[in-house]
Image (cartoon, helix red, strand yellow):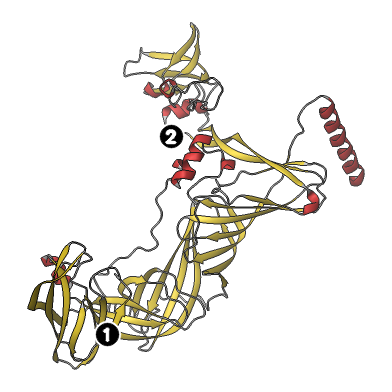
């Protein structure tokens, strides 16, 4: 019986299409539901979507969509060669959806056909009773036709967009038009009223035309679109003196479209996506003139959006001791998510895989990535910047800047012994169940090392100064500039007021020719500022300071200073 019904239905569809063809009517598209199979997420608000569906065998014209608005050059429709894809046509459709009423005007819109008494002020006599029969529709802007033959563009006469400003009320005296946004209160004749109304929105759907689709043939739609991103973060537990527990998680922020049981790849890296900010014409979001303008400018007006920051950093102003959460025997708030899943390397990008992800539009998801144990060392770090500017002048620092130049930081140096890179993200530091700081863990490939600040070391006092000891005026004249050759001596002074021995690493960047360092520093010539008059050097000293010990470091260099 079921087989006979199926054959009868097929014959009816064939007869209907034949009659439509004889009558000259366009064929009707068969809707095909595509399913989101894969999403690759970048950290800049872009996602690469891959949808799949099975082609029906009884029609050559199918309807697919709607999707998120794709970027130019990234929208592709694929199918087997035998299906014979001929074309894809995009058109705009109106989609209606129920919306809860939150104003008096929206409540009136929800109850068209009901009898009500409308009050326009505090005077009870200023009331109108009747049946709500219609609302004025909102006006969308009517763009000019700049390419119509013989038609001149007059942008000043284009009607602006706006919302409907009247409702029609059928009273005993006739039909009355009222401003729904000036009605102060309303009384309905019925006890039960509607509390939601239907609102229309514009979406894009696609007609795909095939020559000979076969039952079971696949269809794939892929595109790059904005509105979705992922934000990683780390938790570093250093309760063990030698090995840190590094835990990673990802937050997925989805404002693009629904995801249901899909494979998601979280991408770390910096891909070259030249037209990511230019909307594809299939999205029908812009006119032809706007699209051509976007191509020249590199960004669509409709695609203007704030790119989410890769990282957010905060500084903890306090620390907890071991007893802060119930003592050492208490359960520690440090998650254990298991080993990292085997990722995939694609050129210079790395993909963290997530399986079976379901996340509706406008939802945010929390996804554990991994927990790994990695070796680390604690040390103290004093970083001193260069005082010679890019214009070869000796920079003057404000008082608050000078104070920061003498800050010593208690830091960690972690070694990436895992098989996957660590992407740039905020890192929360924990010890014995309490938070001790937060910093940024920068991108770290496997086998490399990363430095993370814990807290400012107030028990390690540091002072620095540079003085001029010699000057040769007008030593060099080049490109119309006059340069003095100045000999500068720097002195670094550190004192360890802690009750224990510390390892202190001091780095100093300077521009010029290094003449001497006492004690001997590791000197690295940096390939930075190669067009400047002075070469750039990075000096590094590593000191072991006993409790209460005081040390001094001196260095001398010559720099060409522009007059």
Seen as rendered, the residue at the extreme top is: 173
The image quarter containing residue 231 is: bottom left
Q: CA distance from mark 1 to mark 2?
A: 68 Å
Q: Position of residue 164 (x, y in %)?
A: 46, 23
The residue sitting at 32% across, 15% down in the picture is: 123
| Front residue (pair 5, 345) | 345
Mark 1 touches mark 2? (CB < 8 Å): no
The image quarter containing residue 538 is: bottom left
Q: Position of residue 482 (x, y in %)?
A: 14, 66
- Earlier along the polypeptide chain: callout 1 or callout 2? 2
Q: Is residue 317 left or right of residue 462?
A: right
Vertical placement of residue 532 versus 82, above or below: below
Q: Circle 2 sits in a helix, a strand or a loop, which is it?
A: loop
The residue sitting at 40% across, 74% down in the picture is: 235
Of tags 1 and 2, the one toward the viewer is 1
| Tally of numbered tags | 2
Q: Is residue 204 left or right of residue 508?
A: right
- Can you tell which mark lies on residue 534? none
Determine crowd level at label 2: few under 14, some 14-19, many 20+ residues with C-alpha closer than 10 A.
few
Q: Position of residue 463 (x, y in %)?
A: 12, 79
| Quarter of the figure that contains the C terminus | bottom left
| Quarter of the figure that contains the N terminus | top right
Determine crowd level at label 1: few under 14, some 14-19, many 20+ residues with C-alpha closer than 10 A.
some
Asked if residue 394 can be seen in this view, the reply is no
Q: Position of residue 290 (x, y in %)?
A: 48, 37
Q: Circle 1 sits in a helix, a strand or a loop, which is it?
A: strand
| Front residue (pair 334, 310) | 310
Identify the residue under disc 2.
102
Vertical placement of residue 406 versus 158, above or below: below
Identify the residue under disc 1.
523
Asked if residue 439 can be seen in this view, the reply is yes
């Amino acid at each position: 019986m079921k087989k006979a019904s199926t054959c009868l239905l097929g014959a009816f569809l064939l007869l209907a299409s034949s009659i439509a063809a004889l009558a000259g009517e366009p064929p009707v598209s068969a809707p095909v539901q595509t399913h989101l199979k894969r999403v690759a997420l970048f950290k800049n608000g872009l996602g690469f979507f891959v949808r799949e569906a099975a082609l029906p065998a009884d029609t050559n014209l199918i309807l697919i969509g709607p999707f998120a608005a794709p970027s130019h050059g990234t929208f592709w429709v694929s199918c087997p060669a035998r299906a014979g894809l001929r074309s894809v046509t995009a058109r705009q459709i109106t989609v209606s959806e129920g919306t809860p009423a939150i104003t008096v005007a929206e409540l009136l819109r929800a109850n068209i056909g009901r009898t009500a008494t409308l009050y326009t002020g505090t005077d009870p006599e200023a009331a109108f009773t009747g049946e709500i029969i219609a609302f004025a529709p909102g006006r969308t802007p009517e763009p000019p036709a700049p390419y119509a033959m013989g038609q001149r563009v007059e942008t000043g006469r284009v009607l602006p967009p706006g919302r409907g400003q009247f409702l029609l009320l059928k009273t005993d005296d006739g039909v009355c038009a009222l401003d729904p946004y000036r009605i102060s209160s309303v009384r309905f004749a019925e006890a039960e009223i509607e509390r939601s109304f239907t609102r229309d929105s514009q979406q894009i759907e696609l007609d795909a035309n095939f020559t000979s689709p076969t039952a079971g043939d696949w269809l794939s739609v892929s595109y790059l679109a904005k509105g979705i991103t992922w934000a990683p973060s780390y938790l570093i537990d250093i309760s063990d003196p030698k090995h840190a527990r590094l835990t990673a998680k990802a937050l997925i922020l989805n404002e693009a479209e629904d995801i249901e049981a899909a494979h998601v790849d979280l991408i770390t890296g910096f891909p070259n996506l030249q037209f990511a900010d230019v909307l594809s014409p299939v999205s029908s979001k812009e006119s032809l003139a706007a699209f051509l303008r976007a191509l020249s400018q590199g960004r669509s007006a409709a695609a203007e959006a704030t790119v989410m920051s890769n990282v957010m950093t905060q500084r903890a102003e306090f620390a907890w001791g071991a007893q802060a959460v119930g003592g050492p025997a208490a359960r520690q708030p440090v998650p254990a998510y298991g080993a990292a899943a085997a990722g995939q390397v694609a050129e210079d990008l790395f993909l963290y895989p997530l399986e079976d992800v379901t996340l509706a539009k406008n939802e945010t998801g929390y996804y554990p990535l991994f927990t790994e144990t990695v070796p680390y060392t604690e040390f103290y770090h004093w970083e001193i910047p260069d005082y010679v500017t890019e214009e070869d002048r000796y920079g003057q620092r404000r008082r608050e800047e000078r104070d920061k130049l003498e800050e010593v930081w208690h830091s960690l140096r972690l070694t990436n012994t895992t098989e996957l890179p660590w992407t740039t993200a905020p890192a929360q530091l924990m010890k014995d169940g309490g938070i001790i700081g937060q910093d940024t863990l920068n991108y770290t490939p496997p086998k490399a090392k990363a430095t993370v600040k814990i807290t400012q070391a107030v028990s390690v006092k540091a002072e620095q100064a540079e003085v001029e000891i010699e000057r040769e005026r007008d030593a060099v004249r080049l490109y119309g500039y006059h340069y003095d050759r100045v000999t500068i001596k720097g002195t670094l002074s550190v004192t360890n007021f802690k009750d224990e021995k510390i390892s202190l690493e001091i780095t100093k960047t300077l521009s010029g020719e290094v003449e001497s360092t006492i004690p001997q520093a590791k000197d690295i010539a940096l390939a930075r500022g190669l067009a400047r008059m002075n070469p750039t050097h990075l000096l590094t000293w590593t000191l072991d300071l006993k409790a209460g010990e005081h040390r001094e470091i001196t260095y001398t260099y010559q720099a060409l200073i522009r007059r």
